[in-house]
Structure formats: structure tokens, C-alpha cells
Image (tube, rainbow, N blue to C red):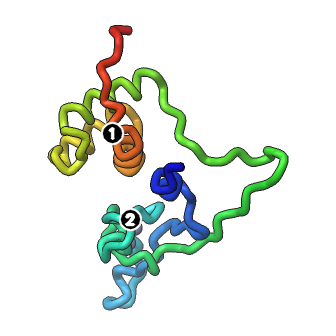
């Protein structure tokens, strides 16, 4: 059993949506930063994980919503990222290039790569975590 892998994809009981911090409170106005969803700014268990990667505000400033329980019978699909063959191949190549450590790549490089293939950095990181060690050369497709 690979318990570690499982814990990586277990959804948290709460999600943090748009940022509600009023950045203009000091001058009596109202201005939000427009952040639509909290994204952890660091690894789980670190202090950075509580600061939003997008707007840098603390997690508590973001609207907290309870993640609905899985509905039995398949009315709601469990969230799971599906990758196309093309995406997988690109991620595999990217991972290979960085030695299967996302930290080895420039932040800007990671960002543009993610934009190009349409996955989030977090998803890419998890994918690399789950697939390192499977770094076998693929037969030419
Ligand atoms: Zn935010
Ligand atoms: Zn914010």
C-alpha cells in the first residue's frame, strides 16, 4: 500500500474561495484584490501553506466553504484530474529535464509550462511526486 500517495490526493474538508480582505479599509473604502480562490503558497505543513499563492493574504481572509461529502451513486463525480496522452508526455519530459524535482526549474519556466499544457502548478507537482521512479523511456509513439 502506498499510503503516502493517497494522502496527496485526499481533498480537505474545507475549501477557501475568493479573498474577502478589504485592502482599502484603512482609507474607509472597499477594495478587494480579486483573488478568486485560495491556493496554498507552500508545502502542506509549512507556514507558507497558509498564505495565498495568488494574493499573499492569509487563508482566513478567503471565504470558507465546506467541501460536500461524496454523494453515493455517482451523482457527483469525484474530482480527479484527467490528463491527455499529450499532457502526460509533456509532463514526463519536463519532469525528466528537471530531474523530477519541480524546485529545479525556474518559477517562470514552471508557470509558462503549466499555462502551455493547461495544468496548475500544484497538479504538476503532485503528478511528478506520484510518477517519479517511473522514469522509464517510453517507446516512440
Ligand atoms: Zn488569495
Ligand atoms: Zn487577498
Residue 40: mark in rendering: 2
Where does the image place residue 137, in percent across and percent down from the top left?
29, 19
At 36% from the left and 32% from the top, the residue drawn is 134
Left or right of residue 126, residue 100 in this image: left
Q: Residue furthest front?
A: 1
Where does the image place residue 16, in percent across and percent down from the top left?
52, 69
Left or right of residue 11, residue 105 in this image: left
Say above or below: 33 vs 114. Answer: below
Q: For the residue labelled by badge 2, is the local secondary structure a helix, a strand or a loop?
A: loop
Disc 2 crowd rating (10 Å Cα; few below 14, some 14-19, many 20+) is many
Q: Does residue 6 appear in this view?
A: yes
Where does the image place residue 120, in percent across and percent down from the top left?
39, 46
Q: Quadrant of residue 80?
A: top right
Q: For the residue labelled by badge 1, is the local secondary structure a helix, a strand or a loop?
A: loop
Instruction: In this rendered view, identify the residue nearer to me: 106 or 93.
Output: 93
Rounded to the nearest angstrom, the CA distance separating label 1 from label 2 is: 22 Å
Q: Does residue 33 appear in this view?
A: no
Q: Residue furthest right?
A: 73
Residue 77: mark in rendering: none
At 84% from the left and 46% from the top, the residue drawn is 73
Disc 1 crowd rating (10 Å Cα; few below 14, some 14-19, many 20+) is some
Say above or below: 135 vs 51. Answer: above
Instruction: In this rendered view, identify the residue nearer to me: 38 or 26.
Output: 38
Q: Which of the two marks, 1 or 2, is nearer to us in this view?
A: 1
| Circle 1/circle 2 CB separation < 8 Å | no
Instruction: In this rendered view, identify the residue nearer to me: 123 or 56.
Output: 123
At 19% from the left and 32% from the top, the residue drawn is 97
Q: Residue furthest top?
A: 140
Where does the image place residue 7, in percent across and percent down from the top left?
50, 58
**Which quadrant is the C terminus positioned in?**
top left
Residue 132: mark in rendering: 1
Say above or below: 141 vs 50. Answer: above
Amino acid at each position: 500500500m502506498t499510503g503516502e500517495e493517497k494522502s496527496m490526493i485526499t481533498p480537505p474538508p474545507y475549501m477557501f474561495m475568493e479573498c474577502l480582505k478589504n485592502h482599502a479599509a484603512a482609507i474607509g473604502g472597499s477594495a478587494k484584490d480579486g483573488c478568486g480562490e485560495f491556493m496554498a503558497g507552500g508545502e502542506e505543513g509549512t507556514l507558507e501553506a497558509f498564505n495565498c499563492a495568488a494574493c499573499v493574504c492569509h487563508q482566513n481572509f478567503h471565504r470558507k466553504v465546506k467541501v460536500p461529502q461524496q454523494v453515493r451513486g455517482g451523482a457527483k463525480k469525484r474530482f480527479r484530474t484527467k490528463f491527455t496522452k499529450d499532457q502526460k508526455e509533456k509532463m514526463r519530459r519536463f519532469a525528466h529535464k528537471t530531474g523530477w524535482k519541480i524546485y529545479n526549474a525556474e518559477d517562470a519556466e514552471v508557470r509558462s509550462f503549466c499555462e502551455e499544457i493547461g495544468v496548475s502548478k500544484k497538479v504538476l507537482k503532485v503528478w511528478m511526486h506520484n510518477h517519479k521512479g517511473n522514469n522509464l523511456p517510453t517507446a516512440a509513439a
